[in-house]
Amino acid sequence: MNIVILSPHFPPNYFLFAVRLREMGVNVLGLGDAEFYHLRPDLQRALTEYFRVENMQNYDDLVRALGFFTHRYGKIDRLDSFNEFWLETEANLRTDFNIFGVKSNAIQYMKRKSLMKEKYREAGITVAEGERCQSVEQAWEFVNRSGYPIIAKPDIGVGANQTYKINDNSDMQNFVSISNCTDYFLEQFVEGNIISFDGLTDREGNLVFYTAHQYSGGVMEAVNDDRDIYYYSYRDIPEDLTNASTALLKAFDIRERFFHLEFFRRPDGSLVGLEVNMRPPGGLTTDMFNYANDFDIYREWARLVTQNHFGAEWNRPYHVAYVGRKNNKNYRYKHADILKMFAEKIVSHESISGVFAPALGNYGYLLRTPDQEEILHMAAVIQEKV
């Protein structure tokens, strides 16, 4: 089996996807812009071959690389990057080389916020009213109809980049001057807590693993307002969240793929659909899967791709939390204090890659315990300011 991984070195913890594939006997073919000798040794050993290109955004170079792999190893069976930024590139390459998975005719529904809303509605899920705007005039018309506050985000975007909460005419004028409202999606602001439904489907689209996470706040606020963020996994998944997410996955026809579905839980308890990401959830969340269930999601994904079988048992015996801290904050407790206080509960801690730091913080702790109240207490202590 021949599987191409785009940018196999990023995010840093995703090198294990390549390692586990190689353990299954797969020809793992890396394609990226990093120098081979900059790759971590475990990743170097996992790759059957690595093709370096100067610019990953030069599609012709990627086509030539896949042509080389095909000539050398035969038909490419799978291609992935596990990264939101490359989803459209992946789909185009799968289409051009007839590779199993999401093709170019479906990817826009997974990339454009405006089209995602159609799938939420198809699944019977309430969404905030919104509109894709292509001009300043169209944006003002939407504001006049909907009123403030509103959220403005690129119709195709990654994370909370260039996303704004607009509270009044002054904010709107600032937004217009920054963006010209070109290819932006504007929607009504929804009051509520963000929750996600995360997991993996098999080749037929069946759910083989799923979990859910509660967030302390939005990524937009963490980035734009420089706030701390933490999030933790549920042990018991709310039935309405499972039902809505299952219907949404069916609407998208997601097969043999990770997913990260986002919702608001409003104060009245109802769900409102936010957006979808058809890749593993970001940061250290895949490692949180492992700690919450005492399994290896990287191995199970590799088994699923090669055998269409998810072999691990899972019943979520633990809550696992990610708690981030930022270098520009004055926290009450030093790093050494945190390690001493919660030594038995901290399963991992590490510096966070620069591109993720504005949202997740410069340093992150993974904690686990069966007790939700203990998770919330530890998160509060770690992020407590002087």
Image: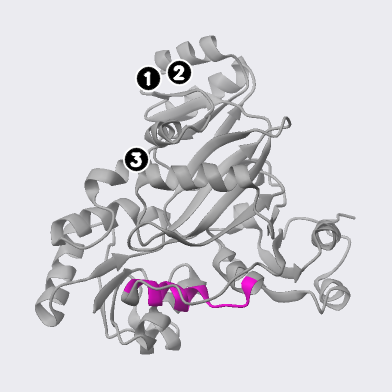
Q: Is residue 301 shown in magenta? A: yes
3 or 2: tag closer to the N-terminus = 3
Task: Residue 109: give its label.
Answer: 3
Question: Relative to 255, does residue 148 appear above or below in the rendering?
Answer: above
Percent coordinates x, y for residue 145 in the rendering: 52, 10
Disc 1/disc 2 C-alpha distance (Å): 6 Å
Find residue 139 and name its label: 2
Judge left or right: residue 356 versus residue 5: right
Label 1 or label 3, whichever comes before in sequence order: 3
Image point (56%, 62%), residue name: 283
- Element type where label 1 sits in the image: loop
Looking at the rendering, the stretch of residues picked out in magenta corresponds to: 293-305
Q: Depth-wise, is mark 1 or mark 3 nearer the camera?
A: 3
- Label the magenta part by its dominant secondary structure: helix
Residue beneath the point at 60% across and 58% down: 357
Residues tagged 1 and 2 counted as in contact (Cβ below 8 A):
yes
| Label 2 packing within 10 angstroms: few (<14), some (14-19), many (20+) | many
Q: Residue at x 84, y 58 (%)?
A: 373
Residue 114 in sight here: yes
Q: Amino acid at mark 1?
A: Ser
Q: Which residue is mark 1?
A: 135
Foreground residue among 330 and 158: 158
Per the model, the C-alpha gap separating discs 3 and 2 is 22 Å
- Callout 2 secondary element: helix
Q: Name the spot of residue 245 as percent of width and height, x first.
A: 51, 46
Say which amino acid is labelled 2: Ala
Q: Nearer the viewer, mark 3 or mark 2?
A: 3
